[in-house]
Amino acid sequence: MFIPRQALVAILLLCLAAVAHADVVKPALVEISVFSEGRFRIELRASIEALLTGINGQYQDTTQAPTSDEYDRLREMQAADLHVEFDTFRQKMLDAIEVRFDGRRADMSIAEVNIPVPGYTKVPRISEIVLEGPVPDDARSLTWLYPIAFGDNAVRVRQVDERNQQWHWSAWQWIREEKTSEPFSLTEVFSPPGFLDIVSEYVGAGFDHIIPDGLDHILFVFGLFLFSAKVRPLLWQITMFTIAHSITLALAMTGVIELPAKVVEPLIALSIAYVGIENIWHRTLHNSRLVLVFMFGLLHGLGFASMLSDFGMPNDAFATALISFNVGVEFGQLAVIGLATLLIGIWFGNKTYYRQLVAIPGSLMISAVGLYWTWERLAL
């Protein structure tokens, strides 16, 4: 049994070490506004560093790409310097993406490029690229093409009647392959998506925020699992975590509370480190741990809210979308726990050596990753 146990610890160390340096590859979010006066405006939010280095949806994180070192170099650049780097990419982007009205390709130009300060160098920096162009007279439909070489994307269209101060959003279309979007009608007011459409869309978004996009949340849940592979201690911890992040997600999305990312992100990383450390020092579940897990859940809920704010919420189905997103998050967490149970809990959870050769080494690595992320996210 000695070799399998060594192998297990080695796998844990390798996996967690990889996570420490991983930067998640996020899909682009694209919002196209078509104005009644005869022009359109595209607001495209994506990682310019990933675009410049060809890191797209085929990679779960940037470390898997052969250009990861160049990505890290760009990620540390000041906004003005990255602007200069992007200038060489402008024409390539204009040649590759397409907006078509009734099948005819539209002319467009890049009007603005808004790049944030470097921030946390291992958290994706999302820049905004604004494109504009004319809308042909009597255009009836619009299609969008964003090449898969640039990554996955989600797109929606807004019809804007400036004279009457009215606008109507379409539903999102998620595109994960090399294909043109389904046509967006420009002659009819978009009908609001149905209940099942909203549930499906936001459950999927919540799940994606955990797997594969939520490496820090995955690591935190895995830390809760390592404390004890038995059902009851894990159930208590996950319950506290779920209640807490549901509360702050709802409060943040309704505008009741708001904390800047420069506060939330380091604290989330620190919560990961603390869970790992406490796994080492405590053998049994106690009330103080449940209180701490609850407090950490409040922080993670603010992290979930950040992603959901970027994705957008339907005004006429806010509660449905919020609950659906939270359900998707829970499905993601359950998937993490289920996988950990299949790979570790069933085989090693009841062994006498579980704590010494699984829980403690894994928790040490979780703590190291959490501390590294904390230091990195504080190093502006």
Image: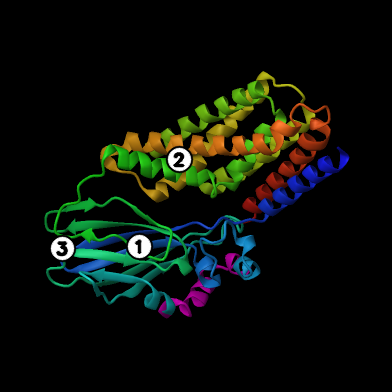
Q: What element carries label 3?
A: loop
Residue drawn at x 68%, y 25% as measured from the top left: 230
Is label 2 or label 1 in front?
Answer: 1
| Residue type at numbered disc 3 | Ser
Q: Is mark 1 on a helix, strand or loop?
A: strand
Q: Which of marks 2 and 3 is nearer the N terminus?
A: 3
Compared with 353, 7 (above or below) is below
Q: Which quadrant of the figure has residue 23?
A: bottom right
Label at residue 258: 2
Label at residue 43: 1
Which contiguous range is marked in magenta?
73-91
In the displayed image of the protein, which residue is found farthest to the right? 2
Q: Earlier in the sequence, mark 2 or mark 1?
A: 1
Compared with 205, 92 (above or below) is below
Q: Earlier in the sequence, mark 1 or mark 3?
A: 3
Q: Residues within 10 Å of mark 2 (few under 14, many from 20)?
A: some
- Inspect this view and state whether residue 232 appears: yes
Residue 194 is left or right of residue 253, and the answer is: left
Q: Distance between the residues labelled 1 and 3?
A: 18 Å
Label at residue 36: 3
Main secondary-structure element of the magenta-colored stretch: helix
